[in-house]
Amino acid sequence: MKKAALVVMISGNGSNLQAIIDAVQAGSLAAEIKAVVSNTREAYGLERARLAGIHTLIKPKRKEQDRAQYDAELAEIVKAFQPDFIILAGWMRILTMSFISAFPNRIINLHPALPGTFPGVNAIERAWQSYQNNEIKHTGIMVHLVPDEGVDLGPVLAQKIVEINPQDTLEDLEKRVHLCEHELLVETIHKKILDLEEFHA
Ligand code: GRF
């Protein structure tokens, strides 16, 4: 069976990358991770990729480079792998159009909150705090396409509510959110792969 080509972009721990690796290895995701790209050398996800025998690339932004220039170079690197999808799994840089326009409808981002809520960093912590302040009853996660430079914005592919319990510590909530993310991200990539026309040829 044909396999979809994925490039996974990370900046940190890479537990979502691990979920994708596990699904590929288990045969439940018809995909091949062509490369894992990190903007930082310190990302533990790089180690996860190496352990799985996946090609890794480290592309830090140089101080003198502007964002558009960096993103254009990044796009060239990623293009070489001819990805069907680019998965932003904890990629902590906001991408400009010089990257995004190279991959229309192919960039998928994961956000640890519901659509329209807590965009940007520390989303889980901000949700937990809002719950303590009685501002929200639950939080959630979403997987969405990245059509432009909007942060954690774009056509929603999947979303799921994550409950918060009164006795939850921030760490409890983080764990629950991440477990849900691992499942929903893999499930959503699976659906997108099934939607690819060449898989029906
Ligand atoms: C996830 O919570 C993701 O939603 C957010 O960054 C986190 C990455 O976690 N964008 P990990 O590196 O996959 O463990």
Image (spheres, grey):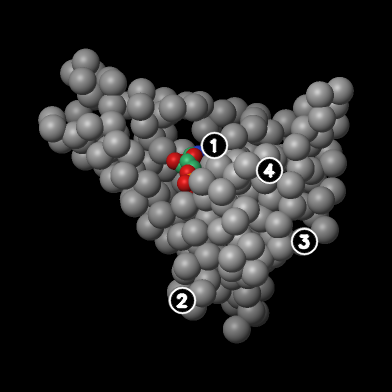
> Can you identify the residue that label 1 sits on?
154
Residue type highlighted by circle 2? Ala
Number of the front mark, 1 or 4:
4
Within 10 Å of disc 2 (Cα), the crowding (few <14, some 14-19, many 20+) is few
> Can you identify the residue that label 3 sits on?
81
> Mark 3 CB in 8 Å range of ligand 1?
no
Number of the front mark, 2 or 3:
2
Q: Position of residue 54 (x, y in %)?
A: 66, 65
Left or right relative to 97: residue 183: left
> Can you identify the residue that label 2 sits on?
26
- Mark 2 and mark 4 lie on one chain; the one further toward the N terminus is 2
Residue 131 figure quarter: top left
Number of the front mark, 2 or 4:
4
Number of the front mark, 1 or 3:
3
Q: CA distance from mark 1 to mark 4?
A: 29 Å
- Mark 1 and mark 3 lie on one chain; the one further toward the N terminus is 3
Which residue is at 74% across, 47% downward?
58
Q: Is residue 68 visible?
A: no
**Count of marks overlaid on the render:** 4
Q: Quadrant of the N terminus?
A: bottom right
> Can you identify the residue that label 4 sits on?
41
- Mark 1 and mark 4 lie on one chain; the one further toward the N terminus is 4
Per the image, label 2 sits on a secondary structure element best described as helix
Residue type highlighted by circle 3? Phe
